[in-house]
Structure formats: C-alpha cells, structure tokens
Amino acid sequence: MPKLKDVDINYDQIKELVRQLDFEKKMALIREVAGERGYKKNFYNYTEGLVKKYKIPEMSEKELDVFLHNN
C-alpha cells in the first residue's frame, strides 16, 4: 500500500467516509489514532500553537472550562 504522503488525498472524501461510520467505529478510530506513537506530543504542540495564535491567557481548569463553553 502506498504511503499517504505519496498519494493525492481528497480529505473531503475521508471526512465523508468517517461521518458514515457508526459511533462505536468512530470511537475505535479515535482510540487508535490517539494511541499512535508521538500523538500526545504532536497534539500538545498543536494546542500550544493555538494558545499563542489566539493569545489565550493561562487559566485554571475551571476557568478554561468556562472559556471553552462560552466560545
């Protein structure tokens, strides 16, 4: 099977395929992706970038919860 970076990907098609999965299959897919090596580090770097981009101030867990639900 060719590597994805060597293939022209249509992400809209992938998104549509995932939407058609039943809930249990979506959760299994999420667990598998989140369990990949390096996922936590990449996710942390991504969210850290969002914090800088949108200038989100440092806040407690409770403050963050309120912030996320209001925005």
Image (spheres, helix red, strand yellow):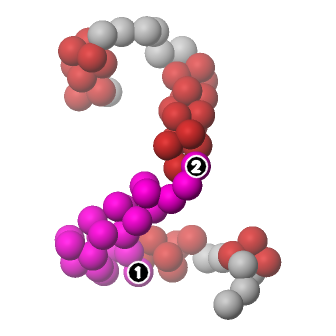
Residue at the limit of the structure toward the right, as seen here:
6
Q: Residues within 10 Å of mark 2 (few under 14, many from 20)?
A: few
Instruction: Indicate which disc, 2 or 1, sits on the residue closer to the N terminus.
Output: 1
Tell me the residue at 50%/76% (across/down). Answer: 14
* Residue tagged 2: 38
Q: Residue 46 location in percent, x, y? A: 57, 37
* Residue tagged 1: 17
Residue extent of the magenta highlight: 17-38
Q: Residue 40 location in percent, x, y? A: 50, 43
Taking the image as shown, residue 62 lies to the left or right of residue 64, namely left
Which of the 4 image quarters holds residue 61?
top left
In this orientation, does residue 25 appear? Answer: yes
Give the foreground label among 2 and 1: 2
Q: Residue 26 location in percent, x, y? A: 30, 70
Q: Residues within 10 Å of mark 1 (few under 14, many from 20)?
A: few
Tell me the residue at 27%/65% (across/down). Answer: 27
Residue 34 belongs to magenta span: yes
**Of helix, strand and loop, which one carries label 2?**
loop
Front position in the image: 16 or 24: 24
Which of the 4 image quarters holds residue 54?
top right
Q: Is residue 46 above or below residue 34?
A: above
Taking the image as shown, residue 21 lies to the left or right of residue 38, namely left
Q: Residue 60 location in percent, x, y? A: 30, 10
**Of helix, strand and loop, which one carries label 1?**
helix
Residue at the limit of the structure toward the bottom, as seen here:
1
